Image (cartoon, helix red, strand yellow):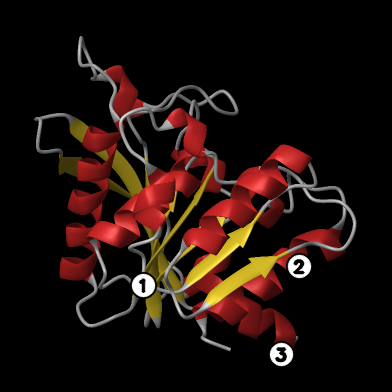
């Protein structure tokens, strides 16, 4: 009975996903969802892979909150449908040309919102695929980040930004992981090696690993041990251990 009460109290201490609307520098409305525990120890900006949307984090953001981390999942302009849900930011794009530079500006707005809402807390950014590579550019331009976590980073999709060159300017802590495909492994290794940070962490899962942030979502993986292995590595990095 006591365990049930504690579980109920923990659930109540974590807020439901709250809608967020932000205005990008080019006027585009950015849509997001925020989840937070009552007293967060840090915050994480969550960035989906290309062609997807913030619902990629539906099974991930609540876990961050239970671990003590507030989060903002953003519908990015390089997005689309995911699990039957639409990307609301993409719906307003109109005739805008998609560029990595504009996507980077969107993230600057999101970081400013997180810092205003959670003053004084360490701010991390986590993303997969194209967003995983964009994190290195973001960290080079925002050296006050507490760290970046890149899952299966793919810099080939950033046509107007050179993530590898930007990585050489990165001084914040860096966490990189990938699936078991040779291309993914090489891409992650190259970006991590280029980073100028004094703290670089590469997580290689024992055995099977999926592409991108899906490894953190128990609904997307087939083995609980695999998911928990990724979470253990991520939490060690966030907590600086």
Q: What secondary structure is marked by label 2?
A: helix
Where residue 212 appears, x then y in whole percent? 63, 45
**Badge nearest the viewer, 2 or 1:** 1
Q: Characterize the local packing of mark 2: few (<14), some (14-19) or many (20 or more) Cα atoms within 10 angstroms.
A: some
Q: Are marks 2 and 1 in contact (CB under 8 Å)?
A: no
**Residue at the extreme top:** 95
**Depth check: 49 or 134 in front?**
134
Return the residue at label 2. 228
Q: What secondary structure is marked by label 1?
A: loop
Instruction: Residue at 67%, 73% (x, y): give it.
Output: 233
Question: Label 2 vs label 3: CA separation?
Answer: 25 Å
Where residue 237 appears, x then y in whole percent? 56, 77
Whether residue 67 is visible: no
Q: Are marks 2 and 3 in contact (CB under 8 Å)?
A: no
Return the residue at label 1. 171
- Quarter of the figure with residue 111: bottom left
Return the residue at label 3. 2
Question: Label 3 vs label 1: CA separation?
Answer: 46 Å
């Amino acid at each position: 009975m006591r365990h049930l009460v504690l579980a109920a109290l923990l659930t109540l201490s974590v807020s439901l996903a709250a809608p967020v609307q932000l205005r990008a520098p080019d006027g585009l409305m950015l849509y997001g969802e925020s989840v937070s525990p009552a007293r967060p120890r840090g915050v994480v900006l969550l960035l989906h892979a290309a062609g997807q949307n913030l619902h990629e984090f539906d099974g991930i953001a609540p876990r961050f909150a239970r671990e003590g981390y507030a989060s903002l999942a953003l519908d990015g302009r390089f997005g689309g449908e995911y699990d039957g849900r639409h990307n609301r930011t993409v719906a307003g794009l109109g005739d805008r040309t998609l560029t990595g530079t504009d996507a980077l500006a969107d993230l600057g707005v999101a970081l400013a919102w997180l810092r205003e809402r959670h003053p004084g807390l360490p701010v991390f950014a986590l993303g997969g695929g194209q967003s995983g590579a964009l994190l290195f550019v973001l960290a080079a331009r925002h050296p006050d980040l507490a760290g970046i976590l890149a899952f299966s980073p793919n810099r080939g999709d950033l046509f107007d930004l050179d993530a590898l060159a930007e990585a050489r300017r990165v001084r914040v802590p860096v966490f990189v992981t990938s699936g078991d495909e040779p291309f993914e492994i090489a891409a992650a290794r190259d970006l991590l090696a280029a980073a100028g940070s004094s703290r670089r962490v590469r997580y290689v899962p024992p055995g099977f690993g999926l592409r991108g942030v899906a490894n953190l979502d128990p609904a997307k993986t087939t083995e609980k041990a695999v998911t928990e292995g990724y979470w253990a590595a991520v939490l060690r990095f966030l907590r600086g251990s």
